[in-house]
Image (tube, grey):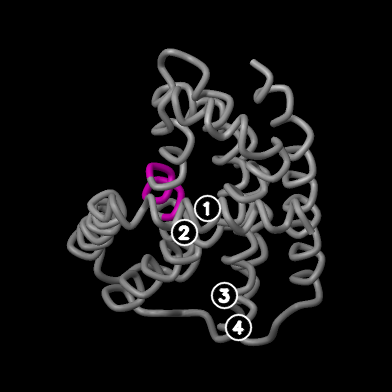
Amino acid sequence: MARRHKTLQLIRAEWQSDLSQKAVLAGVLLQLFTTVLVCYLAVQVMPIPVWNAMFWILVLTGTMQGIVKNFIAVPAGRWLYLFQLCDPASLILAKIIYNSLVMTVLLLGTLLMYSFFLGFYAPQWWPYLLSVWLTGLGVSTVLTLVSAISAKTRHAGLIAPVLSLPVIIPVLLAGMSASRKCLESFLPEAFYKDLLVVITLDALLIYLSLILFGFVWRE
């Protein structure tokens, strides 16, 4: 109960901190809108597989900035305050939950803008949204842990994307495979296998984050 209470307090603190920095989220959404608009102006009609692949490229390039800054922007004084306030597991869990909520907002915003300009081609739209959300959860978890690790280095903004890409690629491949099957008229059974792979990777990443963050915390 104590850990749950601390985790909720940390999530609330993250929300209040972002409220005072609305320009960051607005800047990310503006970047996503600009990227989608450029895609529309460049290729107004595209094949369905290309439509799906382009969406995931936009998600990866557009949301990384909004998630990675979470730990990198934390000053040294606040690290000392958090060290006295809570344990490592509560902190990283709160960061993962909050970043997953931010990722959900960014995913929905990207999908709405993308569908408005380039259409929505998924007949199985509920499974498509589920696969997108679960993949976004894995991506946000990876970016949260990597930003915590790179925050201890001098060039955090450069190191975070480099470290995160090798871990994000398996999650993206599984998520892209699951979402691509939702573009068919009838949902194949292989979709559930891909979805199970995404769920397993998400659970594994969260578990490893809870373990590995303790070592970063002590540095």
- Badge 4 marks a residue whose secondary structure is helix
Per the model, the C-alpha gap separating discs 2 and 1 is: 5 Å
Horizontal side, residue 124 vs residue 120: left or right: right
Residue 23 in view: yes
Question: Tag on residue 102?
Answer: 2
Disc with the residue nearer the chain's start (2 vs 3): 2
Residue range (magenta): 59-65
- Front residue of 92 and 31: 92
- Front residue of 3 and 208: 3
- Front residue of 187 and 104: 104
Per the model, the C-alpha gap separating discs 4 and 1 is: 22 Å
> How many C-alpha atoms fall within 10 Å of the one at disc 3: few (<14), some, or many (≥20)?
some
Q: Quadrant of the C terminus?
A: top right
Q: Residue at x 40, y 56 (%)?
A: 16
Q: Are marks 2 and 3 in contact (CB under 8 Å)?
A: no
Question: Tag on residue 99?
Answer: 1
Horizontal side, residue 182 vs residue 56: left or right: right
Disc with the residue nearer the chain's start (4 vs 1): 1
Q: Are marks 2 and 1 in contact (CB under 8 Å)?
A: yes
Horizontal side, residue 26 vs residue 205: left or right: left
Q: In which quarter of the view is residue 42 placed?
A: bottom left
Residue under label 3: 129
Residue under label 4: 126
